[in-house]
Image (tube, grey):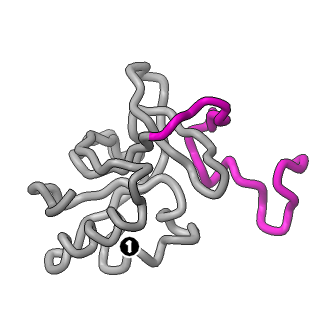
Amino acid sequence: MAGTGGLSLVFVYGSLRRGGAAHGRLRGAELIAPARYQGRLYDLGEYPGAVPSADAGDAVHGELYRLPAVGAEALLARLDRYEGPEYRRERARVGLEARGEARECWIYLYRGDLDGRRRVASGDWGRSLPPRGAPAGGQQG
């Protein structure tokens, strides 16, 4: 998908978040605030996938970023390539967690098969990971 479509914001919920392995790909974007999307989050192994949900109680937690004034289309094109064919970039509304406001933005939604995938009940990919240095699947205190 090419262009910004008039939107200047992007919501990220996985490896693009602060502290995530791919956060550097957002270079030039400005963090606005923690936000949430009405959807369900699934563990796909190395990264998560979000899908929309009609249930108002479902939430995917992430961060909302403002695209740079110059280079926004190039940044989105890089993110499109990074996300690949497993994801589609769509318009969505997210709520700013601390402010209670809603914003329209871009989000990358998973489009693959979810059979056998574990749902991340908290909706927060960062909280679902074991602490660094801890074995995956190990008990946490």
x then y, percent, for residue 7 = 15, 56
State yes or no: residue 52 in magenta.
no
Q: Residue furthest left?
A: 6
Q: Residue furthest top?
A: 55
What residue appears at the point 29 percent right and 50 percent down from the top-left corner?
A: 89
Give the left or right position of residue 132, taking residue 57 as reference.
right
When asked about the image quadrant of residue 69, the answer is: bottom left
In the image, what residue type sits under mark 1? Leu
What residue appears at the point 42 percent right and 60 percent down from the top-left corner?
A: 83
Q: How many marks?
A: 1
x then y, percent, for residue 12 = 42, 56
Magenta span: chief secondary structure: loop
Near-viewer residue (74 or 130):
74
State yes or no: residue 114 in magenta.
yes
Relative vertical location of residue 119 with respect to residue 20 in this rendering, above or below: above
Near-viewer residue (114 or 105):
114
| Quadrant holding the N terminus | bottom left
What residue appears at the point 84 percent right and 48 percent down from the top-left corner?
A: 137
Give the left or right position of residue 131, taking residue 28 as reference.
right
x then y, percent, for residue 46 = 64, 57
Bounds of the magenta span? 112-141
- According to the picture, the residue beneath numbered tag 1 turns out to be 26
**Within-10-Å neighbours for mark 1: few <14, some 14–19, many 20+:** many
| Residue 116 visible in the snapshot | yes
